Amino acid sequence: MPSRRVTRRVLLAGLLFGSFAGCSGGAPRADSPRSPEPSAPRPPAPGPSDPGQRPGPAAPSDPAPEPQGGAAELVTLHMSGGYAGLDDEIVVRTDGSYTTSGRRGPGRPGSFDGAEVARLRRLLDEAALTRLPARSVDPNLRDNVLYRVTYRDHVVVTDLSEPVPALSDAITLLRTALTEALRR
């Protein structure tokens, strides 16, 4: 029996150590120089080369199911990093339907109503992503959350340290829906 007890303690210690190592430094940071700069829209499912993607059993292995109706993709928000080691994404279609995924797998699908979709489009157009730098991240911040927004084939990565009010409002709208959909 002592060998089972020792084995359990070793496994428990390994799990605890592994959960803390993922938060602070074991994996390369998304804002490290080795991270690729976004230059094109990313595929719908997170992959190992995505900023914030951490290997391990908690990472989603299958992409979220596509919504019915075949509406085109309007905007994608991918949140990564932070103390919690976020790796969450929401993909909104032109008809307002959205799919979500997080470290624990797919979230509940949902839908924005017509007024919310119109507001989201207006905010993203006002933010003028094509005129923003592709990457706006404060290198002095640690464990910050990175927001990667893909809209009309343009990708912007920000930590919101240089606020753009319309972009911040769009991210808040998307983040609220994403957080609610991933609640279990």
Image (cartoon, helix red, strand yellow):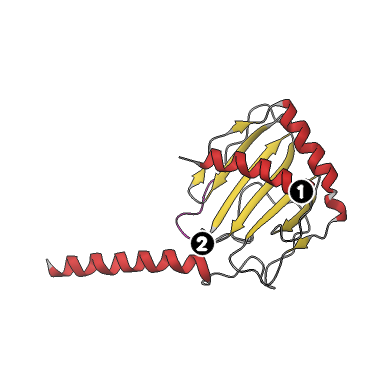
Name the front one of labels 1 and 2. Answer: 1
Q: Residue at the far right: name it.
A: 131
Amino acid type at image mark 2: Pro
For label 2, the crowd category at 10 Å Cα-Cα, with few meaning under 14, some 14 to 19 and many 20 or more, is: few
Q: Quick one: 32 or 171, which is closer to the camera? A: 171
Please give the name of the residue rendered at 55% of the width and 39% of the height, measured from the top-left corner. 180
User: Is the residue 44 above or below the residue 94 in the image?
Assistant: below
Is 103 placed left or right of 163 in the picture?
left
Q: Position of residue 136 (x, y in %)?
A: 76, 62
- The tag earlier along the polypeptide, 1 or 2, is 2
Pointer 1 residue: 167
Please give the range of residues in magenta: 56-62
Question: Are circles 1 and 2 on residues that touch, CB within 8 Å?
Answer: no
Residue 61 in magenta stretch: yes
Query: Gap in Å between the C-alphas at discs 1 and 2?
Result: 30 Å
- Label disc, if present, on residue 22 of the rendered structure: none
Is 167 placed left or right of 180 in the picture?
right
Amino acid type at image mark 1: Leu
Q: Quick one: 141 or 19, which is closer to the camera? A: 141
Which quadrant is the C terminus positioned in? top left
The image quadrant that residue 162 belongs to is: bottom right
Looking at the rendered structure, the secondary structure element under dot 1 is: helix
Is 86 placed left or right of 158 in the picture?
left
For label 1, the crowd category at 10 Å Cα-Cα, with few meaning under 14, some 14 to 19 and many 20 or more, is: many
Pointer 2 residue: 55
